Amino acid sequence: MTTQPVIKGASFVITHTPSLVRHGSKPIREIEKDPKVLDTIHSHLRSYEDAVAYPPNQVFIGNMRPELLKDYERPWTNVKLQGADRFSQWGEILPEDEFYGWLKIADRYKLVSLEEQFLATEVKPKLQNHPLINEEDLTLLGEGVKLPDIQEKIEQGIALPLHINKDQLIGCIETGHEEDKFLSAHILLENLCNKASGIVAMRHALKNFDVRPEQIGYVLGCDEEAVGDRYQRGGGNMAKSIAEHAGCVNATGSDVKSFCCAPAHAVSIAASLVQAGVHDEVLIIGGGCLAKLGMKYAGNVSKEMPITEDQMGAIAILIGKDDGKSPKIRTDAFGKHEISAGSSAQAIYQSLVVKPLEKIGKKITEIDKFAVELHNPDVTEPNGNGNVPRGNYRTLAGMAVLRKEMERSGMETFEDKHGMLGFSPTQGHIASAIPFLGHSREMIMNGEIETAMFVGKGSLFLGKMTTLSDGMSFIIEKNEGVK
């Protein structure tokens, strides 16, 4: 017997980590060529208070609707929202001192060392009051180590330094194996940042929605990190490693990889598992991507803006059997970018939007809201990459005109009516349509809209194994109740 899969909840978390920007892939390369670049980066970092008061961040964690961004003049970095809250019903914006604590909690192999004074006075007192922290977490934090011991490991070349407040040394992370470059301190830092941010997002999802950790049968990771050693690069399993820290004692899991498109693939797999009756509750998790910190920092610097890629996003999505109220996933209308499809924008949207809508007898204009690549234009435009969501909506609108579903005059209002401004951290899998899931779920349950379509795209060609792109789409709609 099949059951209708529904979206039971979605969590969205931002970890504000400006002192880790230096470890992003682009900054590392630029600093190696010119050490003065580090000073430039430091002079353009923003405070935690500014990150919390930043309008797109409040939209991402769910305290503001995307349409409210239109009320503020861009760049939004000039806007400081009054009374902005770090917590929301779905997640939070986490400061970097607390994030280092989560990094230590996620570290099962004791690779991370935090300076004892920093741990005792900055990290522990704050985490003790965090709503997601338990006694086991506080035990895992340990007592810290002395600063000279940290400095010695760094000088020996077996550890990477960790800083706070731009350049204050507060810890280090050691290499996992001296002969395995895929267990280097830097790669392990990437993976642990992903894991730690994912743990926070997963715990928020399980705390804020009506699903208990022990109910989860399967966990799907959809991030961009490659967990493994020299023999099994990318072997995984990030999903299971995160679930271990969230009390999902009855779950197993695996990782789904498809560049930015992985979350959409994960939703289709999770929904299928639930509909087939294999698992009643499935949790999708995607942690943040350290490599993309500061990826487009030069654009912000050239415009005398603060660096907006000073943070990582993390997502968690609960998909389960029909509860009679949560939005339904239309498993009869998944869109996919077939191998035979072309790579033009029109060909991609023909596969991802038109075909699945034709299957269920709907027009483009009959979908209330489309979520596309929701990259924040404060990041992309200064770097010369344009307004990514706007470009996608114009393509969609153009296709609706070609299909005679609306007049050409409607193109100018299509984004406002059926789309939204970009607000997501530009972290590939995080930005690819998924950030609207929490908003759309709430809007559908409140009766504001009835349908939403999520169009995820991925750049498979970046791996040099194929010249193909990728894409998946799915539709959620109002639940009429269990019949």
Image (cartoon, helix red, strand yellow):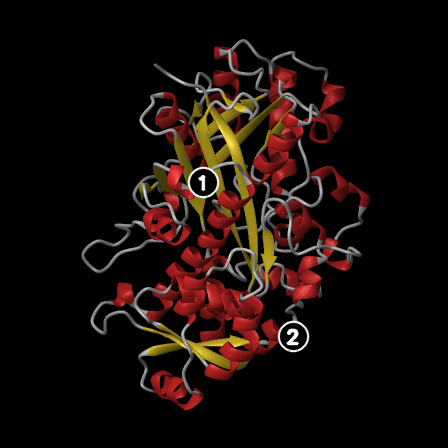
Above or below for 80 versus 475? below
| Residue at numbered disc 2 | 43
Q: Comparing marks 1 and 2, which lies closer to the viewer? A: 1
Q: Quadrant of residue 49?
A: bottom right
- Left or right side of 444 for 348: left
Along the line of sight, the residue nearer the viewer: 26 or 342: 26
Q: Position of residue 413 (x, y in %)?
A: 75, 27
* Above/below status of 285 relative to 379: above
Instruction: Check disc 1 and report its element: helix, strand or loop.
Output: loop
Asked if one can make out residue 288 in the rendered structure from this viewpoint, the answer is no
Tell me where residue 18 appears, x and y as whole percent: 57, 67
Image quarter hosting the N terminus: top left
Q: Which residue is mark 1?
A: 212
Would you place residue 189 above or below residue 275 in this image? below
> What amino acid is at disc 1?
Arg
Q: Is residue 29 visible?
A: yes
Q: Where residue 405 appears, x then y in whole percent? A: 65, 13
Residue placed furthest toward the top: 361
Q: Nearer the viewer, residue 56 or 350?
A: 56
| Residue under the image location 67 percent in, 68 percent down | 47
Question: Would residue 118 be found to the left or right of residue 52 on screen?
Answer: left
Q: Quadrant of residue 382?
A: bottom right
Query: Which residue is drawn at the image coordinates 67% and 23% (left, top)?
Result: 449
Q: How many marks?
A: 2
Q: Mark 1: few, some, or many residues within 10 Å (few <14, many ≥20)?
A: some
Q: Amino acid at mark 2?
A: Ser
